[in-house]
Amino acid sequence: MPTYGALEPFHGEGGAWTEYLERVKLFFNAKSLPEENKKSVFLTCCGSGAYSLLRSLLTPKTPDQVSIDEIFSVLSGHYIPKPSVVVCHFRFNCRSHQTEESVSDYTASLKKLSANCEYGTFLPDMLRDRLVCGINDASMQRRLLEEPNLTLESAVKLLIAMETAKRDSSMLMQSQGMIEAQTVHSAMSYVIAVESRTTQQYASTPNPGATHAARLGIWPEYAAQRLPTRRKRKCQGSTVRKGKQSSQFTALRTVEIFLKSSHRSTRRGR
């Protein structure tokens, strides 16, 4: 006889019995046990707690006087009493999609709740309708309602595809936002560095307005005469105007004011 592991005792309650019973039957098949040996193997492996409970439930009979199917039926009736169909329907129809829940998890939860609803052949349609009504995303719900021949399989595939696209789009937007923030930070750092160098250069120049005007092709003598004294003081290192100004007077602003002043004076001379 081939060896495929061992059957551990049952220590659970309620829903755990269903899974345990499924594993027992799989164990019997794996071992290729004949029908007359299944009861003995189960009663030996189920554990003292389950065996004691079974003896109490079968009184006045004993476990060796009933079949394996009757043993399974008695234990199932104790561990999992048949619930009310109305209550099962209520729980199924009240189950909605949670905020952080995936579509796959939501579908699995609905299928589990429908186990005792006794929907029969209508089960796929009931699951489909609950998916459409219970999904908490308005755009996904609207997309499902647009399908003329929506089935359970197509609804699940469509929802998973939209869920994946939404998640990927969110990741791309976050990555793009980080790149833009880094670009802006780099640009601002560059501008600040340029303004700092320009301010230092103009602060160390005796007459920065005339010097820069000469670079622009304006007569230095004319520039020195036309640049107001107040602006000269600003260009020679004053960055704050007492009582009124707190912004740095940069070199670019100096040239701009000087050129505007020169342009107005030239027009008056004409």
Image (cartoon, rainbow, N blue to C red):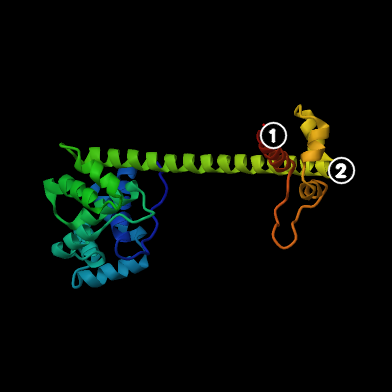
Q: CA distance from mark 2 to mark 1?
A: 33 Å
Identity of the residue drawn at 28% across and 49% down: 138
The C terminus: image quadrant = top right
Identity of the residue drawn at 70% across and 53% down: 247
Q: Residues within 10 Å of mark 1 (few under 14, many from 20)?
A: few
The N terminus: image quadrant = top left
The residue type indicated by label 2 comes to Ser
Residue 164 coordinates in the image, percent (x, y): 38, 40
Residue 240 coordinates in the image, percent (x, y): 75, 56
SS of the residue under disc 1: helix
Vertically, is 208 above or below 11? above
Identity of the residue drawn at 25% across and 53% down: 134
Q: Residues within 10 Å of mark 2 (few under 14, many from 20)?
A: few
N-term-proximal mark, 2 vs 1? 2
| Residue at which label 1 appears | 269
Q: For residue 242, which quarter of the picture?
A: bottom right
| Residue at which label 2 appears | 204
